[in-house]
Structure formats: structure tokens, C-alpha cells
Image (tube, rainbow, N blue to C red):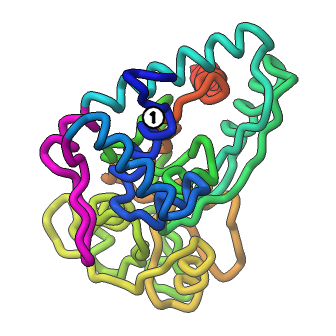
Amino acid sequence: MPVSGMELRELECFLVLSEELHFGRTGERLRLSQSRVSQLLRALESRIGARLVDRTSRRVCLTPLGEDFRTTLRPAYATLHAAFDATRSAARGIEGTLTIGFQGTADDRIMRAIDTFHTRHPGCVTSLTEIPLCDPFGALRAGTVDIAVALLPAAEPDLVIGPVFAAQPQTLALSVRHPLAARSALTAEDLASVPLISIGGPAPAYWRRAQAPTATPGGRPIPPGPSVGTLQEGLTLAATGRGAMLLCRPTADYHGRRDLTFLPVSGLPGSVLGLLHRGAHETARIRAFGTAVADVLT
């Protein structure tokens, strides 16, 4: 798409670099060498007549002009892709492969949405892959999944939240030997009496706090337990009495085991899943799957 000689690949390269702020990772995402990334950036800057990116031996950052250009370019680029995908889909129908990432458990709501999507678009194949519990947004940014069913919140400027699943009650997984295991239910204030297993890894701090709060609604501190990267690690530590882990009810039901008890916890916000995708990479397949999910939820 020439715009005063400009190539679409140059714009795509700039947008990815503005997200990664790293030439190596940008090359990996675009399947280009670092030298080719540098070449595309230089060509774009030459056409514009000014630097868009400052690079030193230690870091890469956008210039003020680069920041303004990214803000202006991102929605225009997304609109261009959406127009192309919509026209192609109208011409031949939605087909190809849609890779769906999920955290924890692909429960019946997700499977019903997939069945609905397949019924409407038999030419499209879906592929399911589990997203690491400790990295809810990484697979989207790396391009290994097209769309993700992930725990909210998701205050990420480059990601778009689509349909949101109904909130599910919170459940506490803890060892059957723990004194609280004799109870039939707990309140949020009871969390002050047991170390709470948290999620480590690259997940943002605000997201980790939402999954493992540090204080009760009444202001009592919740003692920190060990940090884990996967659900199975957390369940194993809970079973050995190292702490307790908050889970949504469907996940607790799916992962029932004899050395754990799962007690409902009142007084906490419910656990919410949302459908996420990269704002600059929306496709007709993603939109169609979002419609299927929204129809299943209503």
C-alpha cells in the first residue's frame, strides 16, 4: 500500500517495535532479522523526515514524534486490517485457523461458544491452547494465540476486552487437614487467618493483587503465602498445608481432589473472565468468535 512510497510492512514494523521496544523481539514476532527491522525503521524515518525511535546500547524508546505517530497510526492500521478482513470474508466466508488461549479450565461456556462458532463457520478450524496462569497476556503479545479467555482485570492499552463472562463465586482451596476445612463456608474476613498463595511471574502487579488480595474488605492483612506460576503448583502447595488458594467455582469443581477441600467465600468480588485480543490485530475470525461468545452468554 504505497503512501508517498511508504510500505505497509514499515508501518507494521514500527507498531510492533513500539510495543516491544526491543529490536530482537520485534524481529521474532515479525519473523525478520534485526537488521531487516532496522532497515524498515530507517526507511520509514527517511520518508517522514525525522527520528521516531531513539536507540542506545541500553534501551529503545520512542521519540515524542514517535509517540504521537503511534497514537495516530494504531487505529488507522486496525481499521485497514478490519476492512481487508471484512472484504475477504465476504468474498469467501470465514475460514482458516483461530487459536484460542485459555487460563485454568476451558469450561462448558467456552466449549458451547466454540460449538456455536463451528456451526456458523464450518470452514474455520479452532485450536485450543492453555495460557500460563502467571502470564495472562504474554501469548497474545507473542502472537501464539489469536484470542484469549483470561482472568480480569486487564488494564492493558494494546489489548481489547470483548465479551465478559458472568462473575463466578470465589472458592478457597485448602488442605483437608487445615482447621478451617471443617467449616462449610467462609467469609472474606476469614482469609486473615491463612497464608494466601499468590501468582508470580510476569503478570502485572494489579492483576496479581486481584487474584490474591493482600487485605480483607475490613482492612485486616492477609498473610502472604508462597508464589506460584501454575495452577497445579498452587493446588499442590495448598494440599501440603503451605497456604490456601482462591479459585473460581468452575475451576474448583474441575480440579477436585481428595487432599483438598473447596469452601465458598462470601464478601469478595466474583472471578471474571474476559475475551481479549490485540487491538491492532483484529480479524473477521476474532469478531465472529466474539459474537458466538456473546450469544452463548445471553
Location of residue 178 in the rendering, given as x and y in whole percent from the top left corner: 49, 86
Q: Looking at the image, is 98 positioned above or below residue 80?
A: below
Query: Can the viewer see residue 23 in this picture?
Result: yes
What's the magenta region? 50-71
Placement of 29 over or under 111, stated as above or below: below
Whether residue 69 is in magenta: the answer is: yes
Residue 268 position, x and y percent, is 33, 53
Res 289 → quadrant: top right
Q: Is residue 153 visible?
A: no
Q: Nearer the viewer, residue 50 or 13?
A: 50
**Residue 255 appears at what percent x and percent y?**
68, 65
- The quarter of the picture where residue 96 lies is top right
- The image shows residue 188, relative to residue 87, as above or below, that is below
Kind of residue indicated by mark 1: Ala
How crowded is the residue under tag 1: few (<14 C-alpha within 10 Å), some, or many (20+)? many
Farthest right residue?
Answer: 122
**Residue in front for this viewpoint, 1 or 105:** 1
**Which residue is labeled 1 in the image?**
280
Q: Is residue 278 left or right of residue 92?
A: left
